[in-house]
Amino acid sequence: MADGDGLSEAATAAASPAPAPGLSPPPGWRERLRAGLAGTGASLWFVAGLGLLYALRVPLRLCENLAAVTLFLNSLTPKFYVALTGTSSLISGLIFIFEWWYFHKHGTSFIEQVSVSHLRPLMGGTESSISEPGSPSSNRESETSRQNLSECKVWRNPLNLFRGAEYRRYTWVTGKEPLTYYDMNLSAQDHQTFFTCDTDFLRPSDTGRDTNVLVYIKRRLAMCARKLGRIREAVKIMRDLMKEFPPLTMLNIHENLLESLLELQAYADVQAVLAKYDDISLPKSAAICYTAALLKTRTVSDKFSPETASRRGLNTAEINAVEAIHRAVEFNPHVPKYLLEMKSLILPPEHILKRGDSEAIAYAFFHLQHWKRIEGALNLLQCTWEGTFRMIPYPLEKGHLFYPYPSCTETADRELLPTFHHVSVYPKKELPFFIHFTAGLCSSTAMIALLTHQFPEIMGVFAKAVSMISRTCVEYL
């Protein structure tokens, strides 16, 4: 019997088809199945609702109830319809105004935010967003989050040298606070880090000998000398610091040096600094990119004319200048509006976000005078900076010369910049659906109210026709 059972099992195994190679389930099939079921859930609920309505049409006496409603609507006067549509227009207009304000303040739709956070879990929408720990989608999400965290790192403003008295004077004149709580909290943490030495608890007499404190103090002395007009003294201190402590490039002392050299109009020295720090292996900044563009613009800006350039084309030097401007604008697209004075400047924050609006304000606040000093530089910038956006792919899944523009800059800039400042956002966000919807609803109801008030007989006939069509459709069902 055992042999017979073994033969029968072998025969059964031989008769069953062997799994064909290459027909294994594709990776991520569970996520796609869940997403498909979640997407068809709304359609299934709609069909089920229609079926239930059809099944209950007799017990609910839909035809009789609709006839009673039609009779009631026919007995109403045109004044009622005017009041109804006018009230609807007023309410939808208020919702539209609130949605518009909320979108410009927070960058998102209030109705969409409430729907996603409260209604989506009730409809089972959270399951589709759950992915397995080792799936490719979860790996991509974690990689994207790590990239966003690195892109949204906040840096100390290297050119900041304002004191409390200057901030208080600004508040006294304008009645506005120039710094946010988040920015001041970061400054307090910086001071605690700088002025707390590793050897304080062992030898209190050594307080101040820490390298970071030494560099911080010398740098502030150089910035004070620059502010007092002793620019050559400031340049000497900065050069000595960069020679003595070459590993401390992350402090961005070279940006202070660039600004001081531009004030001296020592453009050859500026070019030498850029040759060292405008390297592919080093982090970029608006100061580096726009200073490089300024130097190339300087060679052609005094003779540049848009009419002449469009007639004969650009020569090699002009092409290099335009490409440098495009490179700078791609790195930080917010700067040109401040340099061209299309947006008003405010006091720069003590911390900035690279490629963000805060960095653009800090750069333009200290470098606008250098662009104005070179004849025709702002004219060339005005003629060419918008051409950058035709070179960058849209949507911004990849950049042209740099990494794709980070999506987290708006949130971080709103934390760093005061509330009275209108934060520059790139790329421009499309208006949410509910803003279009409420605007259309407000306009249509207002138009119906106006027509009902002006032509009550015609609108009454139209309303009766609509009610009769609705009744006919229900009776047909």
Image (tube, rainbow, N blue to C red):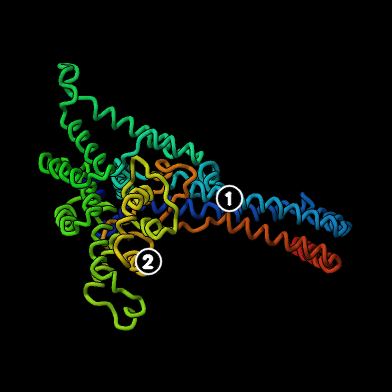
Tell me the number on the disc at residue 154.
none
373 or 254: which is nearer to us?
373
The picture quadrant where one finds residue 380 is bottom left
Farthest residue to the left: give it. 244
207 or 192: which is nearer to us?
207
The quadrant of the picture occupied by the N terminus is top left
Q: Residue at x 15, y 31 (%)?
A: 211
The picture quadrant where one finds residue 448 is bottom right
Give left or right: position of 305 versus 448.
left
Q: Residue at x 52, y 52 (%)?
A: 41
Label whose residue precedes the other's in the sequence (1 or 2): 1
Secondary structure under badge 1?
Answer: helix
Q: Which residue is mark 2?
A: 382
Vertical relation: 175 (above or below) 368:
above
Q: Residue at x 57, y 48 (%)?
A: 111
Residue 48 place in picture, x, y as percent: 61, 53
Task: Point out the frontmost of discs 1 and 2.
Answer: 2
Q: Residues within 10 Å of mark 1 (few under 14, many from 20)?
A: many
The type of residue carrying mark 1 is Glu
The type of residue carrying mark 2 is Gln
Q: Residue at x 58, y 54 (%)?
A: 434
Query: Can residue 15 be seen in the rendering of this structure?
Result: no
The picture quadrant where one finds residue 302 is bottom left
Residue 44 place in picture, x, y as percent: 56, 54
Q: Which residue is mark 1?
A: 99
The quadrant of the picture occupied by the C terminus is bottom right
Q: Residues within 10 Å of mark 2 (few under 14, many from 20)?
A: some
Give left or right: position of 122 versus 267.
right
Marks 1 and 2 sit apart, C-alpha to C-alpha, by 34 Å
